[in-house]
Image (cartoon, rainbow, N blue to C red):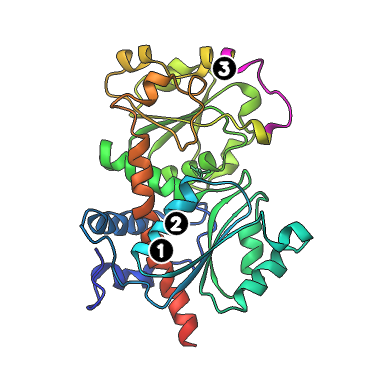
Amino acid sequence: MPDTTQKSKAEKSVQGLQHRHLLGLQTYSADEIALILQTARQFRDVLDRPIKRVPTLRGVTVVNLFFEPSTRTRISFELAEKRLSADTVNFTASGSSVSKGETLKDTAQNIEAMKIDMVVLRHVSPGAPQFLTQCVDAVVINAGDGAHEHPTQALLDMLTISDHCGPLEGLKVSIIGDILHSRVARSGIHGLLAMGADVTICGPNPLLPLHLEDMSPNGTVRVTHRLEEALEGADVAMALRIQMERQGRNLFPSTREYHEQYGIKSEHLKRYPDLRVMHPGPVNRGVELASEVVDHERAIILNQVTNGVAVRMAVLYLLSGAAKSSMAE
Ligand code: CP
């Protein structure tokens, strides 16, 4: 883990992180992503200790602003902040003055007036974290904005893939399902392409976005509508949740037919013995994945969740350099 008393290698590299905020992975370089993953590996050691806490962010105040439901991301950020000894405050839209009509800008500025250093924001609107950077001085971390980006999910996914399959460069990763509505897919594609992985996306036509070549400056993705084509030769299959709440209309006939065509089943694990299966959660059992696949030893879904805490510790730590320097100003 990063040494907190001496200037460690990771700490020196903070100067190498080009961004003040984490709004998405589209603009993050391979070097920056590699630094975050390497720092997360070091923080994992802390999580294996009997006392899972280091003083790294002592004196730093982080507000978790969640305007949308979350289980994994919210708990994971909160745990990461506590493991780093930050002071944390949790805000959820329900029960707040948002229900009385207060805007995001006013909410954030009022919270910042209470002297905070970092904001973790989940919001239904794409671009809300970017907007927040124009309203507050605090460091902003995107915990998922609409169907735009979910960068810490992509980072924990890349850490999990590299744990199980080795260096990301040249690995074959297939992302299957509702790509159109998926911030996880967008961040994943940006990050994986930056790291040199081969990315295939697969799903029914109405769930695939147009103009995929615009999704990343780092390359293009292969597109297929056939699950077998996506799984053949893949190191990892990442199934995505069918997001009924974002669709607003039925883009495929039924979840039963979706499962028949695009659901990963036991027969696929038998046919592709090296394939690992991932899912960002929450899983619709029997839709994206057969229930027995979720529980299979080659499903590494809970490893993703475990890695989420270490990745978020790394992001908070690396970006806290910017928070601390503005504290000193
Ligand atoms: N993967 C993910 O973002 O899960 P939550 O919505 O539960 O945070």
Which residue shows up at 53% across the image and 45% down it? Answer: 216
Above or below: residue 267 compared with residue 279: above
Relative to the observer, which residue lies in front, 2 or 226? 2
Check the picture and name the quadrant holding the N terminus. Answer: bottom left
Q: Residues within 10 Å of mark 2 (few under 14, many from 20)?
A: many
The answer to whether the residues at label 2 and label 1 have Cβ atoms under 8 Å apart is: yes
Which labelled disc corresponds to residue 240?
none
Query: Element at badge 2?
Result: helix
Magenta stretch bounds = 247-256
In the displayed structure image, the side of residue 273 where residue 59 appears, left or right: right
Instruction: Identify the amino acid type marked 1.
Output: Glu
Relative to the observer, which residue lies in front, 53 or 208? 53
Instruction: Identify the amino acid type marked 2.
Output: Phe
From the image, tell me which residue sits under label 1: 81
Find the distance from the CA under tag 2 to the CA under tag 1: 6 Å
Which labelled disc corresponds to residue 77?
2
